[in-house]
Each structure stands twice: as structure tokens, then as C-alpha cells.
Amino acid sequence: MPPHLFATGGYQAFVLGGAERVWLVFALGTGVVAIATALYLMRGVLAADTGTDKMREIAAAIQEGAAPSCVASSRRSRSSSFRCSCSCSSPRPRSSVLMGRWP
């Protein structure tokens, strides 16, 4: 292989050694375990009881009170992750929150 290819960013053959291969497999395995754990915990949270009638009433009041400030904040901050996190907890339809319309 001509030596000038290495300087210009051309193809460079490499071989994973024993330790590199072990760490690669370890990282991939850890990622799979983390995703499986997250799915298991998410399933448990979604299957949990939503609480008593009083708890649901309080949660609805909090969401209703927080919704206008959430829309105002999303207008100031055009961060899509902020708008998404606010629209998920909003009692209103997502499209009205994301578009900045509030009845």
C-alpha cells in the first residue's frame, strides 16, 4: 500500500486484538443490558396504578396550571426537546402546544 494514502486519510487496515475485542463485546453487551433494563422498568411504571381519585385530581390541576407557562417557555426557547417534554405532560393536544396555539 502506498504510504501517501495514510497521510490523506485513505483506507487503513486494522485488526482488533484480544483486549480490544473483549472491550467491544463488553460495551455492546452492556448496551443491550441497559436497554433491556430500561424497557423492564418502563413496563413496570406504565403498569402501575395511577393513584386515588384525589391524586388524579391534584395531578390534573398541576398539569392545567403548568401548561400556560410551558407554552410561554417553549416560545422563548426553540429547543425541540423542551417543547416535546412539555407537550407530553400537557392535557391539551400536542399539535396546539407545538404550534404555539393555546385555546
Image: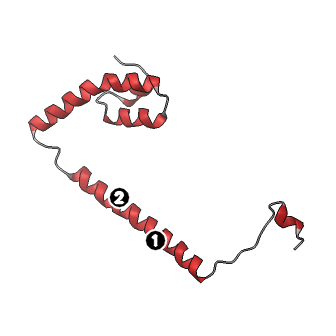
Q: Name the residue under label 2.
A: 38
Q: Residue 29 carries which label?
A: 1
x, y percent for residue 86: 36, 33
The residue lying at 28 percent from left, 27 percent from top is 66
Q: Any mark on residue 100, and which?
A: none
Question: For the N terminus, which image quadrant?
Answer: bottom right
Mark 1–mark 2 Cα distance, whole angstroms, equals 14 Å
**Position of residue 29 in the picture relative to residue 92 (left or right):** right
Question: Percent from the top left, x then y, of residue 98?
Answer: 43, 28
Residue sitting at 31 percent across and 26 percent down?
67
- Give the camera-side residue of 77 and 86: 77
Q: Which quadrant: the C terminus?
A: top left
| Left or right of residue 54, residue 95 in this image | right
10 Å neighbourhood of mark 2: few (<14), some, or many (≥20)?
A: few
Nearer to me, 49 or 9:
9
Q: In the rendered image of this protein, does residue 59 appear above or below residue 51?
A: above
Task: Pick whichever of labels 1 and 2 is earlier in the sequence.
Answer: 1
What is the three-letter code of the residue carrying label 2? Ala
